[in-house]
Image (cartoon, grey):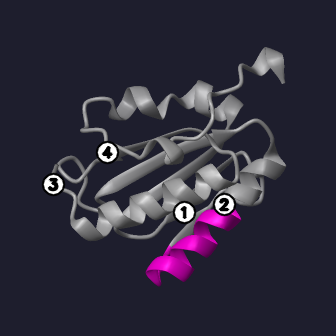
Amino acid sequence: MTATDRALELVRVAAEAASDKLAQEIIAYDVSEQLVITEAFVLCSAPNDRQVRAIVDEVEDQLRLQSGVKPVRREGERDGRWVLLDFADIVVHIQHEEERGFYGLERLWKDCPEIELPESSRGAERTPLDEQ
């Protein structure tokens, strides 16, 4: 693991905030060896656009309140399908379940070390699209 303690702390806060808003299958990767622009990715999803937005707001609020950071970039908010919050040290991807299944970021980053998250910050099981 080469991500800094600061990045790991931000990952923990982001994962906890996402879990509090019922994000599904929260996963974090240490991407510091592969990318120079950030140290860690946090991935999570939700079954609908409104929940994606609620997770985005909570992650942003908790990182500001607990860690004093604001996103340097925020993308995809208008559609509510895949929102990227870039906090420089970490990038948080909040996806609608359809986008998560289609783009498969886990497959893309599977060679990177996974950052262990507390059980309470791993989120709910993903809801298969045909059960929504």
Per the model, the C-alpha gap separating discs 3 and 2 is: 26 Å
Vertical relation: 25 (above or below) 7 = above
User: Mark 3 = which residue?
Assistant: 2
Quarter holding residue 64: bottom right
Q: Amino acid at mark 4?
A: Ile
Label 4 near label 1: C-beta < 8 Å? Answer: no
Residue assigned mark 1: 85
Residue ID for mark 2? 56
Q: Are marks 1 and 2 in contact (CB under 8 Å)?
A: yes
Task: Identify the mark at residue 115; answer none if there is no mark.
Answer: 4
- Nearer to me, 86 or 129: 129
Among numbered discs 2 and 4, the one appearing first in the sequence:
2
Q: Give the left or right position of residue 124, taking residue 26 as reference.
A: right
* Label 3 or label 2, whichever comes before in sequence order: 3
In front: 72, or 113?
113
Single out the mark in the foreground, 1 or 3. Answer: 3
Left or right? Give the position of 65 relative to 39: right
Hey, what amino acid is under mark 2?
Answer: Val
